[in-house]
Amino acid sequence: MADDRWLTFDCYGTIADWNTCMREALEPVVGAAAPALLTAYHQAEFTLEAGPSWRPYREVLSSGLAWAARRLQVPLDPAQGGALVEAWPRMTVFEDAGGALRALASAGWRLAILTNCDDDLFATTRPKFPVPFDIVVTAEQVRSYKPDLGHFRTFAELTGAAPVNWIHVANSWVHDILPAARMGLRSVWVDRDLTGHPAKLAERRITAMRRLPEAVADVSAVPPWPPLAGQRGPGQRAVRGHREPLSHRGSLVGVEPPALPRRHEFVHPPRGKLHHEVAADEHREDLPVVAQRAAPESAAAARQRHAVSVTELADQILEAFGRRQVCGHADRVDLGRSVS
């Protein structure tokens, strides 16, 4: 498993059409206020997910909707507070996902999902996928939400995957592309919402999945960041609520992982420009310098750092972008918010 080539995907907003499903769920409930309410919900969701204790995503959906309605003073009958949860089984898969996923599977890539979702909610979407996924890591399993690194570190521990054989694919800049860069991973940003965020954290930016096989081929040809001596593997740091090493046996859908060897951590050096061609309609910028720690930190220190990083990160992003849209799978509106 450690020698396989892995593509990890965000699910909702990348493969499944979260935004359309949620908007259509709100329109019968609040009418013309649905777009504004969904915008406010996004910000409420991000705040709830960054809270001091984990809560199930279905609770985030209901609590976030009620909180957003109170903020906007939009009348919301308590009986309709579960509208987003009730609409979840109706969510569809983007039409361009099927061909791209089949082509990548045929090319020998193993596919996995890293999703900010509950196991039971994800189970309603999984049968709609055009190809099977080998591994699924949910927020319920890791007891945290992206952009926390829990999903990524758990996946690395379960598979032995490392930056040399792992590319991440996602729509959300905040919840996926940013943490993938922090993990030292190469990534493809599927910017369906044309958010305007800087493309420099991803090796390739596309706006639809029909171009994903080509983008993955390009990114796989880009050399990964080599390991630094004395560093531990990306799956070996503490995930919120867990002690090292991570095992999560039996937590995957249909997968029982074997015992895996310990690995060295791949911490990437400062990045420069990537000199490969991209399509004329895709924006590229120099990749940033990423600060490094000189030595491994203790598990306790890692837990403390990750516990505060999500909230601090949200504040920094909202300030840097003038409280514009800071994530994927959302309508393009001016009110700043974040989603999972």
Image (cartoon, grey):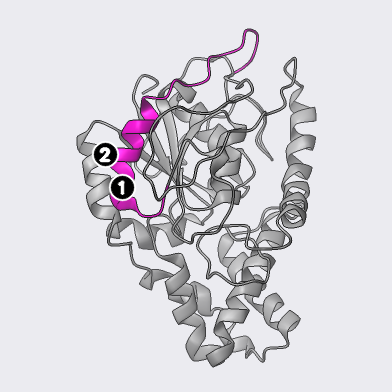
Whole-percent x, y for residue 275 in the image: 45, 27
Residue labelled with disc 2:
104
The answer to whether residue 266 is above or below residue 156 is above
User: Mark 2 or 1 closer to N-term?
Assistant: 2
Q: Residue at x 77, y 52 (%)?
A: 52
Q: CB under 8 Å between callouts 2 and 1?
A: no
Amino acid carrying label 2: it is Leu
Residue labelled with disc 1:
211
Query: Is 210 included in the stretch rendered in magenta?
Result: yes
Quadrant placement of the C terminus? bottom right
Q: Is residue 340 left or right of residue 216?
A: right
The answer to whether residue 66 is above or below residue 317 is below
- Front one among 266 and 304: 266
Whole-percent x, y for residue 238 in the image: 67, 30
Q: Please provide the residue range marked out in magenta.
A: 206-232
Q: Residue at x 27, y 46 (%)?
A: 101
User: In the structure shown, which secondary structural element does the residue marked by tag 1 occupy?
Assistant: helix
Label total for image: 2
- Distance (Cα) linking label 2 and label 1: 11 Å
The answer to whether residue 158 is above or below residue 111 is above
